[in-house]
Image (tube, helix red, strand yellow):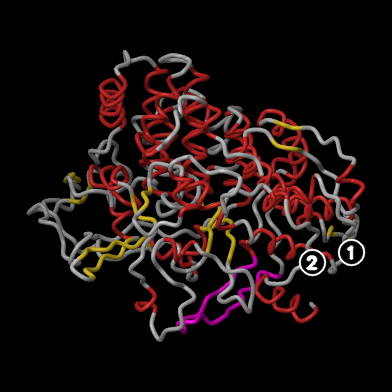
Amino acid sequence: MKRYIKTILAFLGMGFIVSFSSCSDMLESDSSRQAFDPSMDQKTDSVFYAFGIMQAMQQLADQYVFQGEMRGDLVKTTSYTDNNLRELANFTATTANKYDSAYVYYRVINNCNYYIQHRDTTLMTGGNNVTLKEYAAVKAIRAWAYLQLVRNYGEVPFFTEPLTQISQIDNNNYPTVTLPELVNYLAADLEPYSSRFRGSMASVPLFGDQTLQSTTNYGSTKSMYTRLLSIPVDVILGDLYLENGQYDKAALCYIDYLVYAAPYTYSNYGAGFYTRQNGSFWSLPSDMSIRDMQNDYWSPIFGLGSGNQLSEVISYIPMAVNRLQGTTTDVPLAFGFNFYQNSNSANDCYVDDIQITASDALIALSDSCDYYYISNQSTPSQTIVKKAKLGDMRYNSIIRTDNRDDELRTWITKYNGANVILYRRSTVMLHLAEALNRLEMPDAAFAILKDGINDHWVTDADYISDKTRQAVQTTYPLFSSANRSKFAAEENFIGIHSHGCGMVGDSVDATGYQPGISPYQMTTVIGQKMAEIQKTFNVPVGTTLRDSVNAMEDLLCDEYALELAFEGTRWPDLMRLARHKDADGLYGSDFGRKWLARKIGRKSAKNLEDISNWYLPFK
């Protein structure tokens, strides 16, 4: 196909883009320029344009990560931190900040608008529509970009026509929309392309399902997977509804994705057994065997290696291996890894001037976790699972430590591959858990952490209520008669908490599922979280279902930190959870704001109980 779209436009380095030089140019320009109109009335020519949109996504990648993480509670600055990042971290960023630009999102939106208005969606080959998946994927990207704008700025100008004539910009009266208004429009726009109506045909376009490779400056091979360049409609639709507190619709969207669009060839992901210093093991319990704990299947996900590891990633932004081949990224360097350094070895790319490192709060959370293991006192007739205060292994598996100049340095390695991951399978599962929890099914949410998504929910799990068991077979049909077989395999959809904490699930015995076999049990864990909330916030935590829902939501907040740290989602997650706590009103109509402010603590120079301080100045 035109030499495979010029090798994906030289690794997404030169796509056609409808754009102007800044956001103000876009909405208040006195320029006389006009964009060139490419043709999109043939079966393949729009692919050039689709990859141009992907190239525009590359140009917002750094901002997406830094806006989402620097304002959260999981990172801290150092003496080397760039001032633009430091301003984001302490909430003092102005419109002069390098990473405060609405334009980079509007550039994507304008390209999508142009494609949507001009693409012929009636083209057929052999009775199959050859453009509809691509068309839906572009709408999904546009929705994602608008969602990021509203998350960062609160209310934003909204338009769906492509701005290619200067008169459109100078004479505009585009409305300003808030989150509810945005969701009302975008959800209606996306629903017809959901798998609920189109089944497996709603999966993303594969663009030939190609893997392209380039060589990095230090000699390793970097691949780009074209099947991961799009965002599934059901996933972004679920996020829109979840953000807006429409939990019922959000849950159904995530279920639609898992049922119709998600691949099912997953490995049993878990982080290997790590310490942060000297590469040696902790002092382990005498009855603990480490024979199955030394392999790491979790952290290689972020390098997007190959095979089953790749199936965890749903959507990402791949960055070029050098500036000659396309858009590069500063994110790895901020975490201390110079991806673009000329060297014979990746080991030489670790620099001393690390700008971003893990916060004390994240390290404390990780270290506070229990690790669950199969005791070597187990017998063929009885599996014994115990716990030890050894911490969560996920943080430990994505760091590198070294003494340089008599100083211990720690590097975060999630971005060593220069990829920005937008969605993973774990993201969808956690978002589904959040929605189900707010639908008064904290047991279903806990099941996703403990046992993952498998049919033990409706057969053996003793902590699942009859009400929930019925709901997930009917109203939220994960385990309907038509879908249940898709989630029957033990190795698929394992519990998210087990990624870092070992044998948290009960399905560990060769003879089948045995309820209650792991000490990681709902009553105990949620009870501990309730006590923590009461002590921390001095609120009267009771034993009602609403108290359980709030405590489960805090457990999910912890799991977001452990699983998704540094991936650009932390601040949006905290804002969403805070808004929903306020709306619930269980501990007062301002509890969510107080909860968020305490999470951030003295890091912020502004009062975060004032919602207006959550947003960046619009530029």
For the question of whether residue 515 can be seen, the reply is: yes
- Residue type for callout 1: Phe
Label at residue 58: none
Instruction: Judge by depth and name the residue closer to the eye, 18 or 307.
Output: 18
Quadrant that contains the C terminus: top right
> Residue drawn at (59%, 61%), measured in percent from left and top?
317
Query: In the rendered structure, does residue 189 fall within the stretch colored magenta?
Result: no
Residues tagged 1 and 2 counted as in contact (Cβ below 8 A): yes
Spatial separation of the CA atoms under disc 1 and disc 2 = 9 Å
Image coords of residue 458 (percent x, y): 44, 34
Disc ID at residue 36: 1
As shown in the figure, which amino acid type bears the numbered disc 2?
A: Phe
**Local secondary structure at mark 2:** loop
Can you tell which mark lies on residue 16? 2
Q: Position of residue 296 (x, y in %)?
A: 33, 64
Residue lying farthest to the bottom in this orientation: 344
